[in-house]
Amino acid sequence: MKNPEINAARLLDRIQQLGAIGRDAEGRLTRLAASDADMAGRDQLVAWLEAVGLEVAIDRIGNIFGIWRTDTDANPLLIGSHIDTVIDAGIYDGCYGVLAGLEVLAALKEAGVAPARPIAVAAFTNEEGVRYTPDMMGSLVYAGGLSVEDALARVGIDGTVLGDELRRIGYAGARDAPFATPHAYVELHVEQGPVLEHKNLAIGAVETLQGISWQRITVQGVANHAGTTPMALRRDAGYAAAKVAAFVHERAKANTSGSVATVGSIAFEPNAINVIPSRASFTVDLRNPDEARLRQDEAALQAFLDEIAARENVTYTVERLVRFEPVTFDKQIVALIDEAAAARGLSVRRMTSGAGHDAQMVARIAPAAMIFVPSKDGISHNPREYTADAALVDGANVLLDVVTRLVGI
């Protein structure tokens, strides 16, 4: 047996190859869940899994697993992420974690090692949630947080039904789960934020993940002439929406607890330059790593909505879109990540993830943690998303070392 080593050239080449799949005529990368482009990416991933000698299993929600079975019936170590993308995406988000997981298994097999338990690499369905909601759907179903029947019935932004589309592209599996509850789960990911680069650090050992609260708020006022209606007599839904947007921004900015808040989409009706808006519909994204403080942020928003509705003589409704509690990852695995990075001479810090990830779902049923590598300028969900090759290899090596510890090599 030789010491396992990451094949850097193979890993980097696969990242580029997968990143070329799903390009449109303008060169934009878009692989929405269960689309034709997603099918092409899945087909390539499955071919790579099989080439490494892994057993490929697909569950009912379309999650793909490449499984290295052993002689034991011990619960498997699970690694991975997702390969679906946002619209006009970069090539690293999610894909890096899946392909680095594949490379770890290839390196271990080539070294002739004998793990004490099965290992599997996962590519979870619809992590991004662009075509179908909620996001992180495949891992949420896998962890038992959403029924597979409910998930498969979800209607997409294009009117399609997820279950129909998975069958159409050939990735509707027959089983609810292909193997036992994981022994542990480790996800390698680009940071998607600026912290590691700003601090000149190589590795993030992610110990917590922010809670997320998404709401769609609809304000109802009265449309009227923009020139003839006195300001004091207006019931302006657009103004009320703008005040809410300013409120959540300023409150989060003044808060030292780690709160962030975003109004990411907004629409007015009738949406005319000379008409007071009768209706405003907008989303609010609230995040905080502390559940009690996230609830405080939600309560403050509710109170302000009541206040602005009374002051401006408008009404409102709230639709809750997503609500996930903050996650504290497994302390022992986080410590292993810390130790593995230090042993390779890589600078490392404990940190919080501001984005949602499959790891937060799997953490419901198994010990889990994440490894971050730097993102150039903190940019993600964007074609300019970039992580240096050396950093990608460093992260894969840390994942390799953590895996060897967790499977008793």
Image: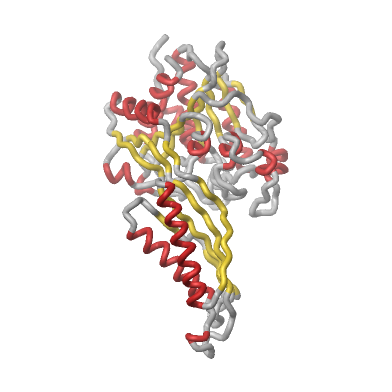
Q: Is residue 135 left or right of residue 370?
A: right
Q: How is the image coloured?
A: secondary structure
Task: Pick whichever, 83 or 369, lies toward us.
Answer: 369
Residue 375, relative to residue 313: is it above or below? Answer: above
Residue 175 percent coordinates (x, y): 68, 29
Of 245 and 103, nearer the camera is 245
| Residue 364 vertical placement versus 71 (above, below) | below
Instruction: Examine the rendered structure and indicate whether residue 47 appears above or below residue 134.
Output: above
Q: Of all residues shown, which one is farthest toward the bottom? A: 228
**Nearer-the-camera pick, 216 or 384:** 216
Residue 286 to residue 72: above or below:
below
Residue at 34%, 47% in the rendered image: 194
Q: Position of residue 90 (x, y in %)?
A: 47, 45
Residue lying farthest top?
1
Can the viewer see residue 95?
no
Q: Residue at x 59, y 79 (%)?
A: 222
Q: Where does residue 136 sit, x and y in percent of width and height?
A: 55, 42
- Is residue 360 toward the left or the right of residue 149 in the image? left
Residue 60: tell me if it is visible.
yes
Indicate left or right for 193 with 167 as reference. left
Image location (x, y in percent) of residue 394: 35, 30
Q: What residue do we see at 42% from left, 14% from top?
A: 409
Q: Residue at x 42, y 62 (%)?
A: 248
Using residue 115 as the reference point, say whether residue 144 is left or right of it.
right
